[in-house]
Amino acid sequence: MRFEALREILLKGGIAPRHVRRYLAELTEHLDDLTAQQRAAGYDGEDAAIRARARLGDDSELAAAMLEQKSLRSITVRAPWLVFGLLPPVAGMVVSFAFIAPLVVIALLFHMATPGSIHAPGWFQELAFGLTGLGNITLAPLLAAGFVFLAARQRIFWFWPLLAVLLIVLLDLQFHADFPAPGQRGGSLNIGAGLWASHSEVLLSHWRMSLAQLMLTLLPVFWLFRKRTIAG
Amino acid sequence: MPSESALAAGLSELMVLRLLKEQEMYGYEIVQAIAVRTRQTLTPGEGVIYPLLHALEKDGLLKSRRKNVGGRSRIYYSLTARGTKKLSAMTDHWTSLSNAVGAVLHAV
């Protein structure tokens, strides 16, 4: 790919990926124009390409011009402590509430959450058990993968994505649905996090699922380590 | 007093804003227009124009849009209202600076 070395320099230098992408696209178009111009001037084949590349500027000149523009730096580079230190717990809680919100809305629509409410029907219980189970196994790993992806695309130092993933592991997001025996009213949907989760004993009894969640959450970091090790 | 590189950066910014005041252009067109109007006096690596365009857009002085012309998709830049104001201020500044330098050079 054209400008691959330049891409790496810019990303490692902290330039936001969208600016890097656009810069390289513009340079590619510009180089095509310059090559066409050289051909029109009578140079052919490789000669035209070499002259066009020289006029565009060498990689170090092109990189220096971009790196000089501090405003084009990514926030993940300017404030990694914010993105990888503060954001993971906040994102974890926001995503958890967003995930459980449809169940709450359904419960409200079907008058399951008001005094004297009806017993939660079977379909709702199945939906609630399914969604909370899905949330327990997928949400933390997906969140971790998101932060590792952010770090990978910006070539961020490994410490920061590791910190984000460890915070997500410590946050220990948990969902739990609970319904009484048929004929009795009530039921509850719970979101818990870490040491203060009201249903941690449930997860302890389902240690296989907890272990699977932990492994899946750590998996993106292992992937990043492997990718960086291979890349040298 | 501004440093030499700051003067050069300010000069590039001024020329880009001035050219885009006339019409929207894409990077290659801007570089060609600068070369023609300065009679090839300013010939940096042509690719270095883009970081400046990105930064000016980020500052709200330019806006961009992708446009298909002759079967090719290009990013065209144009001046915003804020860019027009900045151009006016920069033009005044450079005119007075140029007059001042001219007065020193042509004295005696």
Image (tube, coloured by chain):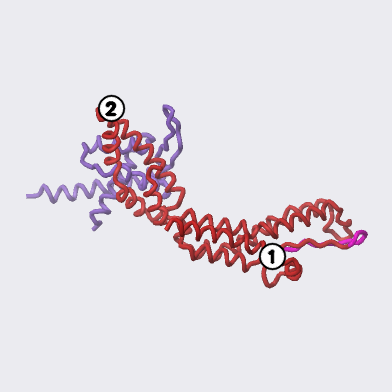
Chain colours: A red, B purple
Q: Which portion, as a residue range, is magenta?
A: A181-191
Name the spot of residue B98 as percent of width and height, x first.
21, 47
Question: Which numbered circle lies on residue A12?
Answer: none
Q: Chain of mark 2?
A: A
Q: Select label 1 or label 2 by which is in front.
A: 1
Drawn side of residue A116 relative to residue B22, left or right: right
Q: Check if mark 1's residue and mark 2's residue have beta carbons within 8 Å.
A: no
Residue placed most toward the observer, A34 or A204: A204
CA distance for labels 1 and 2: 67 Å
**Residue A153 within the segment the image draws in magenta:** no
The picture places residue A167, in percent across and down from the top left corner, at 58, 67
Residue B62 x %, y %: 41, 43
Instruction: In the rendered structure, find residue A40 and report the number of the disc placed on it.
Output: 2
* Type of secondary structure dominating the magenta stretch: loop
Whichever of labels 1 and 2 marks the residue nearer the N terminus, that label is 2
Residue identifier under label 1: A210
The residue under label 2 is which amino acid type? Answer: Ala
- Label 1 marks a residue whose chain is A
Disc 2 is placed on an element classified as: helix
Place of residue B52 in the rendered image (x, y in percent of width and height, measured from the top left): 35, 47
